[in-house]
Image (cartoon, helix red, strand yellow):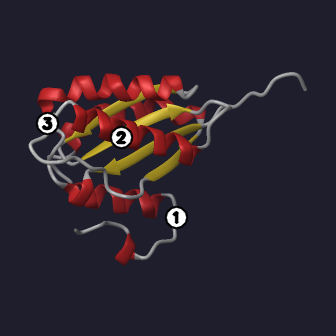
Amino acid sequence: MANTFTKIYIQYVFSVKTRRNQLNISFKEELHKYITGIVKNCGCKLLSINSVPDHIHIFVAMGTKISIADLMKEVKSSSTKFINDNMLTKIKFAWQDGYGAFSYSESQVNRVIDYINSQEKHHKKKTFKEEYMEFLEKFHVVYDTRYVFDLD
């Protein structure tokens, strides 16, 4: 086989360390563009991105040259450096350790994009913790509640 082909859609969900409200709307667009560039430079395609003050969702069509874990490592480390180097937050910024990565079929792509685009509306009714726990349950992820969120 001469080429490698994939069609893998992953929604990443990850939060600010201790779920602080540090993702300010004043730099939201700049951060989203920066993360879009990271994803593209890693050979993937960003389908949707949205953040609220304490967490972010990115929806990616994975490429063939990077793993799910390595893409997340690159996104989190590079975006942390970008935020801190540009002093976009009042205190030192960090993402919480870990993340959620959930896979979808092509038939679900538009629904996931709509969901991510409506985060502000969605979080008027539900906290990030409630949302995240629902993801874990919906995708039948086995977890220990003691290790889902860092508290300090």
Q: Which residue is mark 3?
A: 24
Residue nearest the viewer, comparing 106 with 41 = 41
Q: Which residue is mark 1?
A: 140
Q: Is residue 101 left or right of residue 105?
A: left
Residue 34 vertical position relative to residue 144 in the rendered view, above or below: above
Expressed as whole percent of the image width and height from the top left, the position of residue 18 reads: 22, 60
Expressed as whole percent of the image width and height from the top left, the position of residue 27 reads: 17, 28
Quarter where residue 12 is shown: top left
Q: Is residue 112 left or right of residue 1?
A: left
Comparing marks 1 and 2, which lies closer to the viewer? Answer: 2
**Label 2 neighbour load within 10 Å: few <14, some 14-19, many 20+:** many
At horizontal 55% and vertical 29% (from top left) the residue drawn is 42
Q: Mark 2 to mark 3: distance in Å? A: 15 Å
Quadrant where the C terminus is found in the figure: bottom left
The image's mark for residue 74 is none
Q: Label 3 sits on what residue type?
A: Asn
Q: Evaluate if marks 1 and 2 touch, with contact meaning CB atoms under 8 Å apart.
A: no
Mark 2 or 3 closer to N-term?
3
